[in-house]
Image (spheres, grey):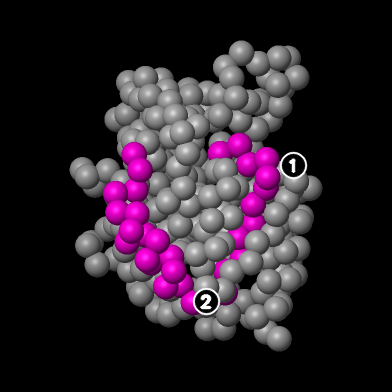
């Protein structure tokens, strides 16, 4: 696998990992939330690449503001800017319409870019769906992050700062509360170890700014719905009924808006599970491989 620093039009650099010569079929993996490219490396990419022909190429990258890519601008996170940077990244690599696999945030970045031969997503947020519970949870999460790690905003996530970032950002979300039982504390310790490589190196300011973005509704829902309706390429949205982060109801609504989509619905998978745990990754990979195979028939 080759590491590249890819310069885009505004002079910023995107850190990328590339496997293959990019001449045949290409899959671009697009990360969720504040995770770096390693989000796909533990379970999903190894399982997918084992089953596909050797002439497939694979592209991973870190958003601006994540990992080793250029730091976030003074404006913070702006969704349409992230989408434009994604498009410029594809242009810089000479990729026209590769296959895309978007995880959580990566799903709507992929869809809004509309530069894919096919789109597969897991845990797909619908920016037009925001019920009262979801709105309340996102605003509480923003407050917790700002209060809990604000004093670290000028630092990066490293060995010293990671425990605080994990506790404020993930532990309460995963378990739904701050006071954990002994069994939950053991489980949390294991999850903390698994997630750590996907966060190391990211500026903590990027974390805070992302949850400020999430706390506010998308500013132009009419334009968003219009752009979703314009997507013609095949889409597979994979989602669990028990997703604790992104309610599946919004994904059902997305499925109605898209021209050429299908859903794979799971029981008892978590939002982060398929990236971390083999038994949760297995059905997702199976459905994704079937989806790719169906495009050849």
Neighbours of disc 2 within 10 Å: few (<14), some (14-19), many (20+): some
Instruction: Tell me where the magenta segment starts and ends, as one range.
Output: 216-245
Q: Is residue 106 above or below residue 171?
A: below
Quadrant where the image shows the C terminus: bottom right
Neighbours of disc 1 within 10 Å: few (<14), some (14-19), many (20+): few
Q: Is residue 61 at all visible to an observer of this figure?
A: no
* Badge 1 element: loop
Residue 118 x %, y %: 55, 73
Q: Is residue 285 above or below residue 152?
A: below
Quadrant of residue 264 within the rendered picture: bottom right
Q: Is residue 25 above or below residue 112?
A: below
The front one of 20 and 293 is 293
Distance of label 1 from label 2 (alpha carbons): 29 Å
- Which residue is identified by label 1? 268
Residue at 46%, 63% in the rendered image: 110
Residue 185 x %, y %: 68, 19
Quadrant where the image shows the N terminus: bottom right
User: Is residue 168 left or right of 171 when viewed as pictured?
Assistant: left
The front one of 5 and 96 is 96
Residue 179 x %, y %: 61, 13
Q: Is residue 141 above or below residue 227?
A: above
Residue at 43%, 77% in the rendered image: 95
User: Is residue 179 left or right of 200 when viewed as pictured?
Assistant: right
- Point out which mark residue 193 bears: none
Residue at 22%, 45% in the rendered image: 75
Sequence order check, earlier mark of 1 and 2: 2
- Which residue is identified by label 2? 233
* Badge 2 element: loop
Is 268 contained in the magenta span? no
The front one of 158 and 177 is 177
């Amino acid at each position: 696998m080759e590491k590249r620093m890819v310069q885009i039009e505004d002079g910023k650099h995107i850190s990328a990992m590339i496997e293959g010569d990019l001449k045949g079929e290409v899959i671009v993996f697009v990360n969720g939330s504040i995770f770096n490219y390693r989000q796909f490396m533990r379970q999903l990419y190894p399982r997918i690449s084992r089953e596909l022909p050797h002439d497939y190429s694979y592209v991973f990258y870190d958003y601006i503001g994540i990992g080793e890519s250029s730091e976030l601008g003074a404006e913070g996170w702006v969704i349409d800017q992230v989408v434009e940077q994604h498009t410029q990244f594809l242009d810089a690599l000479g990729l026209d319409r590769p296959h895309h696999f978007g995880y959580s945030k990566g799903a709507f970045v992929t869809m809004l870019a509309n530069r894919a031969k096919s789109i597969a997503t897991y845990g797909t947020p619908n920016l037009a769906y925001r019920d009262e519970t979801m709105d309340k949870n996102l605003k509480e999460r923003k407050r917790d992050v700002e209060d809990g790690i604000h004093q670290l905003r000028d630092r990066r996530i490293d060995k010293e700062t990671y425990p605080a970032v994990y506790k404020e950002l993930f532990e309460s979300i995963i378990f739904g509360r701050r006071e954990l039982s002994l069994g939950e504390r053991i489980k949390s310790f294991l999850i903390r170890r698994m997630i750590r490589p996907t966060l190391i190196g990211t500026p903590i300011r990027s974390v805070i700014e992302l949850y400020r973005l999430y706390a506010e509704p998308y500013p132009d829902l009419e334009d968003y719905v219009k752009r979703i309706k314009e997507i013609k390429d095949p889409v597979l949205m994979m989602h669990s009924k028990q997703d604790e982060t992104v309610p599946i109801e919004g994904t059902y609504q997305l499925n109605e808006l898209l021209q050429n989509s299908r859903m794979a619905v799971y029981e008892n998978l978590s939002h982060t599970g398929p990236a971390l745990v083999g038994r949760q990754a297995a059905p997702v990979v199976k459905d994704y491989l079937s989806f790719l195979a169906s495009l050849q028939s």
